Image: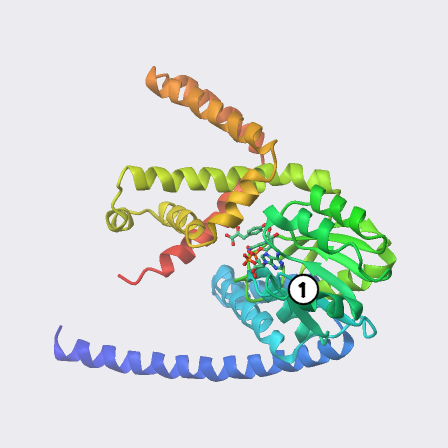
C-alpha cells in the first residue's frame, strides 16, 4: 500500500470511528427512552412485548430505510436486536403484581433450573416466594399453611408420586400448579391430590432465555380457572404467549416436538462419538447449516441427561413415533443402496409439496439464522 492510500484509509476509518461513537450515544439515548417506556408499562401493568407496536414500528422503519437506499433487512436486524436488549433490561424495573392478596408462593423444586427462573420472575413481580427443595420437607407444613399457590417443578420421574404423597393436604383455596414437560399424568395427579384450583403449565423454553418476551407457555386447565386467571395475566405481562391445550393434545404434540427431536439429536451425538469424529475438523469444514446443527446437537449434551431421559421415556407412545422414523430412515437408506436416484427425487418432491408454503417460509427464516451463525465466526 502506498502512503497516499494509507493516509486516505486512516482518514476514512477515523470518520467511521466517529460515526460509531455517535451510534453509541444514540443507543444510550434509545435505551434510556425504552427504560422510561418500561416504567410506564410497569405502572400500568402492560405486557413488555407489544406485537402490534413492534410490527408497525418495523414496517415504518423498513419503508424509511428503503427510501434512504438502506437495505430494509439491515434496520430490521438492528431494531430487533435492540428490542431484545430492551426486553432483557425491562426485567430490571420489575413487573406489575397482578394478584396482591395471594399469600406466599411455594416452589417445590425451587432450587433447580426452571424453579430458579420462575422464582426470579415471581419475586420481580412482588410475590413472596418460598423455596422447598429436597432437603426442606421438615418446613413443609408451615410453608403450605400460608401458601396461596404451590408450584411443582421437580424432575419428571418423581413428579406424580410427589404430588400424590406430599401435596394432598394443601389449604382448600390454594392453587396447585406445575411446570412439567408432560401434562396428562401430572394434571391428573394434581386433580386427585387437591380439591381446590389446579392448573398445569409447560414453559416451552429452557432456563437460559434471559427474558420471557415472545416465549410460549402452554396452559392445561385443571379446575376453577377463575381462581388462577390472574396467573395467566401475570405470565402475559412477562411477555410470554399463552397457548391453551388439553393435556392429551399437548402430550401427543410433544412426541414429535420433544421426544422425537431429542432422541434423534441424542443418536446424532452418539453416532459422532462412536465414529470418533474430530469436532475441530468438522468445525473447520462446516457450512453455516452444519455449524447450526452442531450447535443444536452439542447444546443437548451440555444439559441434564436426567431431564432428557425423562422427557423421552415419559410417554410410552413416543417409541411409536421414533419407530416410524427409524422405518422411514431404513426405507430411504434402501433407495441409496439400490442407487434409486429417481425415486429419491420423486419422494423429495412429494415432501416439498406437502410442506407447501412453509418450505419457502422456513428457508427465509433460516437464511437470517444462518447469517447470524456466519456473523459469529471469529476466524
Ligand atoms: N430445564 C428445562 O429446560 C425445562 C424443564 N421443565 C420441567 O421443569 C421441571 C424441573 O426441571 P429442571 O428445573 O430442569 O430440573 P432440576 O433438576 O434443575 O430441578 C429440580 C429440582 O427439584 C429438586 N428435587 C428433587 N427431588 C425433590 C423432592 N423430593 N422434593 C423437593 N425438591 C426436589 C432438585 O433438588 C432440584 O433442585 C421438570 O418437570 C421439567 O420437565 C420444563 C421446561 C423446560
Ligand atoms: O433449551 C433447550 O435446548 C430446550 O430444549 C429447553 C426445554 C427443555 C424441556 C422442555 O420441556 C422445554 C424446553
325 shown above or below 174: above
Q: Please name the residue shown 35% across and 21% down the image.
A: 336
Which residue is the extreme one toward the top? 338
Q: Nearer the viewer, residue 313 or 337?
A: 313
Q: Please name the residue shown 66% across and 75% down the image.
A: 124
352 shown above or below 311: above
Position of residue 335 measured from the top left corner of the image (x, y, whole percent)? 39, 18
Is residue 213 visible to us here?
yes
206 shown above or below 69: above
Position of residue 319 measured from the top left corner of the image (x, y, whole percent)? 55, 30
329 shown above or below 256: above
Position of residue 373 measured from the top left corner of the image (x, y, whole percent)? 39, 55
Q: Which of 317 and 289 is in front in this view?
A: 317
**Quarter where residue 54 is shown:** bottom right
Position of residue 43 measured from the top left corner of the image (x, y, whole percent)? 75, 79
Total number of numbered labels?
1
Q: Please name the residue shown 50% across and 49% down the image.
A: 306
Left or right of residue 78, residue 168 in this image: right
Q: Nearer the viewer, residue 233 or 99?
A: 99
Is residue 56 visible to us here?
no
Q: Name the residue under label 1.
A: 107
**Quarter where residue 169 is shown:** bottom right
The quadrant the N terminus occupies is bottom left
Left or right of residue 255, residue 178 in this image: right
Which residue is the extreme one toward the left? 2
Q: Please name the residue shown 48% across and 63% down the image.
A: 74
Amino acid at each position: 500500500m502506498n502512503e497516499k492510500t494509507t493516509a486516505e484509509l486512516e482518514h476514512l476509518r477515523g470518520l467511521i470511528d466517529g460515526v460509531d461513537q455517535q451510534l453509541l450515544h444514540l443507543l444510550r439515548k434509545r435505551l434510556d427512552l425504552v427504560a422510561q417506556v418500561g416504567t410506564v408499562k410497569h405502572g400500568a401493568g402492560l405486557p413488555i412485548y407489544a406485537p402490534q407496536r413492534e410490527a408497525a414500528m418495523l414496517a415504518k422503519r423498513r419503508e424509511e430505510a428503503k427510501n434512504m437506499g438502506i437495505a430494509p433487512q439491515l434496520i430490521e436486524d438492528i431494531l430487533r436486536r435492540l428490542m431484545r436488549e430492551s426486553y432483557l433490561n425491562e426485567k430490571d424495573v420489575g413487573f406489575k403484581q397482578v394478584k396482591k392478596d395471594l399469600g406466599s408462593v411455594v416452589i417445590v423444586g425451587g432450587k433447580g433450573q426452571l424453579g430458579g427462573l420462575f422464582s426470579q420472575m415471581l419475586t420481580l413481580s412482588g410475590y413472596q416466594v418460598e423455596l422447598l427443595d429436597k432437603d426442606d420437607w421438615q418446613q413443609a407444613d408451615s410453608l403450605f399453611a400460608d401458601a396461596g399457590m404451590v408450584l411443582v417443578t421437580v424432575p419428571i420421574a418423581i413428579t406424580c408420586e410427589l404430588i400424590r404423597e406430599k401435596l394432598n393436604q394443601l389449604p382448600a383455596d390454594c392453587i396447585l400448579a406445575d411446570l412439567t414437560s408432560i401434562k396428562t399424568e401430572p394434571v391428573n395427579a394434581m386433580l386427585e391430590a387437591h380439591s381446590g384450583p389446579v392448573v398445569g403449565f409447560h414453559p416451552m423454553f429452557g432456563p437460559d432465555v434471559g427474558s420471557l418476551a415472545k416465549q410460549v407457555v402452554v396452559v392445561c386447565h385443571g379446575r376453577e380457572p377463575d381462581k388462577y386467571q390472574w396467573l395467566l395475566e401475570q405470565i402475559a405481562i412477562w411477555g410470554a404467549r399463552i397457548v391453551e391445550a388439553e393435556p392429551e393434545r399437548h402430550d401427543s404434540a410433544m412426541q414429535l416436538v420433544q421426544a422425537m427431536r431429542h432422541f434423534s439429536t441424542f443418536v446424532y451425538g452418539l453416532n459422532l462419538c462412536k465414529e470418533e469424529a474430530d469436532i475441530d475438523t468438522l468445525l473447520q469444514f462446516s457450512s453455516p447449516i452444519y455449524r447450526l446443527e452442531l450447535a443444536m446437537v452439542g447444546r443437548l449434551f451440555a444439559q441434564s441427561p436426567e431431564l432428557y431421559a425423562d422427557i423421552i421415556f415419559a410417554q410410552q407412545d413416543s417409541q411409536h413415533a421414533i419407530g416410524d422414523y427409524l422405518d422411514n430412515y431404513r426405507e430411504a437408506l434402501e433407495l441409496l443402496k439400490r442407487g434409486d436416484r429417481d425415486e429419491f427425487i420423486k419422494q423429495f418432491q412429494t415432501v416439498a409439496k406437502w410442506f407447501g408454503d412453509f418450505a419457502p417460509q422456513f428457508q427465509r427464516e433460516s437464511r437470517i439464522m444462518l447469517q447470524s451463525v456466519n456473523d459469529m465466526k471469529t476466524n
